[in-house]
Image (spheres, rainbow, N blue to C red):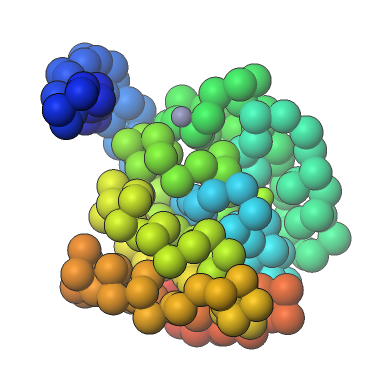
Amino acid sequence: MRLFEATETGSIEIQIGEDLQAKQEELAERNRRFFQERRIRVFDIAGSVGAGKTSLIGEMVERLSPKYKVAVIAGDVATTHDAQRVTGKGATKVLQINTGGMCHLDAGLVARALEQLPESGIDIILIENVGNLICPAYFALGAEARIAVVSASEGAHVIEKHPAMFQSANIVVLNKIDIAEAVNVDLNRPLEDLKALCPDMKVLKTNCLAGEGIDDVLKALEIV
Ligand code: MG
Ligand code: ZN
């Protein structure tokens, strides 16, 4: 984890919590092994509050559940709204983790949620991270891939302001493309920034509310 302190002339990097980071890595690796042994495909969906993570998950569950047993783990500081929104889309199990103030999920919290899942039969787990483009970047959960969801309404500079999050992602979903013009955002800007930051990143454009572009996301994740 890299932490910077702002100074009058710029910023200085502070070295902290390396042993904490090692512990996190170990827990993430344990989750990874758990998933591999059971052949469960697991995706970590991260992004700001309001980017469309829950809508994306709902759409994915709807398409996947006729064929696969899907579980959803929704992380939030408080409330069960997101879990409730996904319930009824066909998921086998929907769990809500309330972090009690913590602004990201970590591998330990996910491991505790896994204890609540059925012993066998789950094919896919979709984990909704806490809405936040900052610290979730530094906490691996043990998922096979991270989907970073970003919406047109987050402004033209959202990518360059949050490089760590996008560098930690395996695919990027650019959501709410239908409202870009209304909020006066030129989508070429975030797309160019992403190209400069992560030249090989797969970027999928979606309108999750209308269900547009979801099949492309599933294809990019190689879930047939
Ligand atoms: Mg949500
Ligand atoms: Zn956090």
Along the horizontal axis of the image, is 161 left or right of 132? left
For the residue pair 71 and 145, the one nearer the viewer reads as 145
- Identify the residue shown where x is 65% and y is 43%: 74
Mark count: 0
Residue 96 visible? yes
Where does the image place residue 210, in percent across and percent down from the top left? 73, 81
For the residue pair 30 and 101, the one nearer the viewer reads as 101
Residue 67 visible? no
171 to 141, vertically: above or below: below
- Identify the residue shown where x is 78% and y is 64%: 90
Where does the image place residue 167, in percent across and percent down from the top left? 26, 55
Q: Splitting the image into 4 quarters, where does residue 27 fall? A: top left
Where does the image place residue 77, in percent across and percent down from the top left? 65, 29
133 to 166, vertically: above or below: above
Along the horizontal axis of the image, is 140 left or right of 186? left
160 to 1, vertically: above or below: below
Taking the view exactly as shown, the residue that stands out farthest to the front is: 8
- Identify the residue shown where x is 54% and y is 23%: 102
Quarter of the picture containing the N terminus is top left
Where does the image place residue 181, in percent across and percent down from the top left? 59, 81
Along the horizontal axis of the image, is 199 left or right of 43? left
Q: Splitting the image into 4 quarters, where does residue 183 fall? A: bottom right
- Identify the residue shown where x is 25% and y is 25%: 6
